[in-house]
């Protein structure tokens, strides 16, 4: 019988180690590709960037402007820009030597993990890392590269969420002040039936344009890393 996926069915009925090795490598590649979105979101700067950009849109009260596609696209390119040194190091130390046959697959994975671990450890709070290390009953290693991914990734994620929400809170403050001022003026003029958002929205957009808001937001994100 022929198989839909070449090599998988035949390797199960043969004693040739090369066929089995090829099949396992194919399954590993498919697994990595299926986990690629989770790796992008949870092991890079993407989480912080997209949350902060979403806070900007929410604070401006502009509904779907900018659209989700624009925010996600900007977050992706900023992520590639910030993570480019990490990608370059992983490519130089792990991928290229593996493709040339100089190191094994296991060694390549270990070398590729190292730059990501260093990046995530710098952005992870010690308190968050201790939480998962203690719960998983891991011993705190002396080297960053020896920290298990199962503890580092969730610790990095909740640290990124906290940092992103802190930045989002600071973004909200000036727009909240404008809303309060407009609402107070409307109440003093006894115009309670007029929605304050209708009046405050142009002033919020004008303030954001005058201070060059997108430049400041992107600069703050870059500096935060």
Image (cartoon, grey):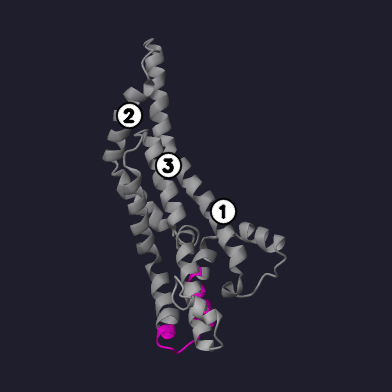
Q: List x then y, in percent, for residue 146.
A: 60, 74
Query: Which quarter shows the C terminus?
Result: bottom left
Question: What residue sits right under mark 1 in the picture?
Answer: 158
- The residue lying at 37 percent from left, 17 percent from top is 185
Front residue of this view, candidates 146 and 103: 103
Circle 2 packing at 10 Å, graded few (<14), some (14-19), many (20+), is some
Where is residue 95, by image quadrant? bottom left
The tag earlier along the polypeptide, 2 or 1, is 1
Question: What residue sits right under mark 3 in the picture?
Answer: 55
The answer to whether 6 is drawn above or below residue 224 in the figure is below
3D distance between C-alphas at marks 2 and 1: 32 Å
Front residue of this view, candidates 180 and 116: 116
The answer to whether 25 is drawn above or below residue 161 in the figure is below
Question: What residue sits right under mark 2 in the picture?
Answer: 201
3D distance between C-alphas at marks 3 and 1: 17 Å
- The residue lying at 31 percent from left, 48 percent from top is 70
What is the magenta range?
97-116
Could you tell me which secondary element the residue under label 1 belongs to?
Answer: helix
The tag earlier along the polypeptide, 3 or 1, is 3
| Residue sitting farthest toward the top | 190
Q: List x then y, in percent, for residue 97.
A: 42, 85
């Amino acid at each position: 019988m022929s198989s839909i996926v070449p090599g998988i069915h035949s390797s199960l009925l043969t004693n040739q180690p090369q066929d089995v090795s090829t099949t396992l490598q194919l399954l590993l590649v498919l697994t990595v590709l299926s986990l690629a979105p989770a790796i992008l979101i949870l092991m890079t700067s993407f989480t912080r960037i997209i949350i902060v950009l979403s806070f900007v849109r929410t604070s401006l009260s502009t509904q779907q402007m900018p659209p989700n596609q624009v925010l996600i696209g900007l977050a992706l390119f900023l992520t590639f820009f910030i993570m480019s040194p990490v990608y370059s190091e992983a490519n130089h130390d792990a991928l290229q030597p593996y493709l040339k046959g100089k190191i094994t697959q296991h060694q390549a994975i270990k070398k590729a993990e190292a730059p990501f671990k260093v990046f995530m450890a710098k952005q992870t709070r010690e308190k968050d890392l201790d939480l998962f290390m203690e719960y998983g009953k891991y011993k705190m290693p002396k080297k960053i590269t020896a920290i298990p991914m199962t503890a580092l990734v969730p610790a990095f994620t909740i640290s990124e969420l906290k940092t992103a929400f802190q930045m989002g809170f600071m973004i909200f403050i000036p727009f909240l002040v404008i809303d309060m001022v407009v609402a107070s003026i409307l109440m003093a003029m006894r115009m309670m039936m007029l929605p304050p958002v209708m009046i405050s929205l142009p002033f919020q957009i004008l303030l954001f344009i005058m201070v060059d808001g997108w430049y400041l937001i992107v600069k703050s994100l870059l500096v935060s890393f």
